[in-house]
Image (cartoon, rainbow, N blue to C red):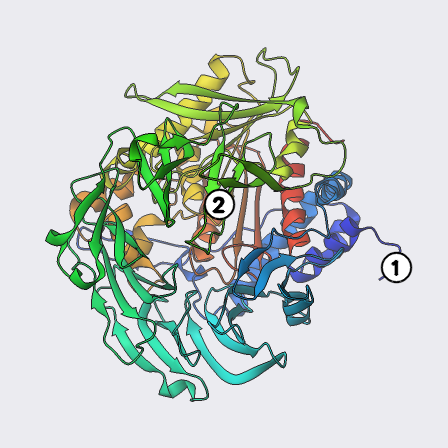
Amino acid sequence: MQKNLTLSQTLLAILLATSCLNISAVIANETPTPPVAVKQPYTVSSPHGDRQDPYYWLRDDSRTSPTVLDYLHRENDYFAAYASKYQPLTDKLTDEIIGRIKQDDSSVPYSEGDYSYYSRYESGKEYPIYARKSLKDGSEQVMLDVNKLAEGKDYYRVANWLVSPDQNLLAYLEDSSGRRQYTLKIRDLRTGKDLADQLTGLSGSLAWAADNQTLYVIQNDPVTLLSTTVLQHKLGNKAAAAKPVYQEPDNSFYLSLANSRDNSYVVITSESTVSTEIRVQPSNQPQTAFKVLAPRQRDFQYDAEHHQGRWIIKTDWQAPNFRLMTVDSNKIGDRAKWQPLLAHDEQVFIQDFIAFDNYLAISERSDGLRRIKVMPWQSPDKAYYLASDEAAYVTRFEKNPEQNTDWLRYSYTSLTTPETIYTLNMKTGDKQLLKQTEVLGDFDSANYVTERVWATAEDGVKIPVSLLYRKGLPLDGTAPLYQYAYGSYGSSSDPSFRSTVFSLVDRGFVYAIAHIRGGQEMGRHWYEDGKLLNKVNTFTDYIAVTDYLVAKNYVAKDKVFGMGGSAGGLLMGAVANMAPDKYRALVAHVPFVDVVTTMLDESIPLTTNEFDEWGNPKEKAYYDYMLAYSPYDQVSKQAYPALYVTTGLYDSQVQYFEPAKWVAKLRTHKTDQNPLLFKTNMEAGHGGKSGRFSRLAEYAQEYAFILNLIGINQ
């Protein structure tokens, strides 16, 4: 490769090579005929009738079938050939997006024990470096240089790391496939060498016992990938000697691990969509049994943190938006012994909390915004909110490892404000700016406007919408729209700063986040009204937001672009079937589109965890309802918008064959001439490529596709 290639050209070469694309077709600038998948008879059985799935053959759990891989490569060839038509624009966008990033950036250090910990990037490097500095002499120690660990690998990610209590050992979890099945390694920070200890097939949680010799991890089922068993590993022992200390009996529950914030306990959390059960063990007594904080019950959720001899508990027990309660450490096991601490509020959803010695900090959602309230323990009536001058914004807790402090570290961001980290003295109100993410180039937040508007859903419910556009943009019904939403799992789509989207906004787009039902922006009911037998509200809310922005002349009705990923990709698939004429194009990243077939098959990773989100199709009411909106099943002979679909061959969250089948079916059913592009990342999983520049290049590819459709090629 020539040494004078630009970064965008280098990334293009990487993307071409890793996807096994037909480079000759790209060079020739020819768009071949889209591949058409053959049909093979296959019956999907259920208690409520059989369905024919002629593209089921595209499922290959081994990911080695020559026939399947050939089809995916041919789709990648078609994608590359089509995209070659606007390659100069893609190159320009890649350089532009990467050009906004401060390449040698670092995080704000936080102090713990004898060190301050942080991560940093070096210019031109894809991966972070995790480091610490001695509080005594300021010398830096590199704990993990992920760039070195990733050398020679198509995909690499350090998913989690945790330093031992004596700060001499570093446990870390690595993934070299994108499948989110992690390998445990342990580094001796005194020597910089990894120990021989290694466990595989793990989830992403870690916890240490106080003896610095006992480590807790979670083993996954090798087929379903469900987190099933908590293992206690003694350093120096073989992996097979790891002791099971908890086995989850219910396959609708996820497992997670952590140390309590004061490091007094090891905490095991079993959690489903509607239920929680927490087990705790004193971290200085790893030989003792774990004790249950409160037994699980259906429709009973809680989370807990230990502080000064008591557990502070966030729970939805008789409180849909959650309340706070407390119980002495020696009285756990019986929910009846919990005492009220902060009452339930129908207008306020409690997201999170941090207990300090003198203050309680609460992260809550109210009026569709994520805000922080500070409450002095001794004077609860003097609680106050952290203020903002913007209509739509987000405040979040940063890492606050110490309890005996009056300083709260938090971040503030909005669609126009890059992430800004402050530390606040909760006693005096003094606030110190620690860092604001630097956006390079000619970015100036004063050149942009953010708004919060409210669209009306089909049933009259008001839907919050966050908007971003360039100041002075004529709102006369001529602007193109890029509309994002997610709307599942109670995951809220906060109006946070995204530097990538300015490549559209600076070209005249309105960027909208539709806070549709299925998230929790407006409280727990917002989630309940967008799942199970209410799921269609998610889709109709999204369409209602589009209609509102068109009707109010924010945007042009023939220049509307939608984007969503994963469950948001399901949203895109449903919208494509329900309202295809309202969108110029839809972008569906790693989309969950084959709802019924996947949810019928409990061997598919993570299926059983999802029954309380989507429903169990073995029950007829859910089967019929899910079938009525499942994007794959509802593909019909009609005109569709242009579609841009992506997946990862090793995706463990949404298997690659779902979008592959969906695209194959669309190719034989759609009656339009709009482009349908499908790209499979052959080395990655649900999150796409692992390197930061490679991920940014993928944004550029998506944006170039969109801009080219409306004739913007600069």
List the residue tagged with mark 1.
Answer: 3
- Mark 2 belongs to which amino acid? Trp
Q: Residue furthest left?
A: 336
> Which residue type carries mark 1?
Lys
Residue at the spot x=51%, y=59% of the render? 685
Q: Is residue 481 left or right of residue 538?
A: right
Left or right of 572? Residue 306 is: left
Which residue position is annotated with label 2? 407
- Residue depicted at 37% across the width and 67% down the height: 225
Q: Is residue 279 above or below residue 289?
A: above
State whether residue 480 is above or below residue 25.
above
Horizontal and vertical percent for residue 462? 34, 21
Quarter of the picture holding the N terminus: bottom right
Residue 474 is situated, as x and y percent measured from the top left of the image, at: 63, 12
Would you say residue 601 is visible in this rendering? no
Q: Name the residue located 61 percent from the left edge and 36 percent from the top edge.
A: 418
Residue at the far top in the pictured view: 476
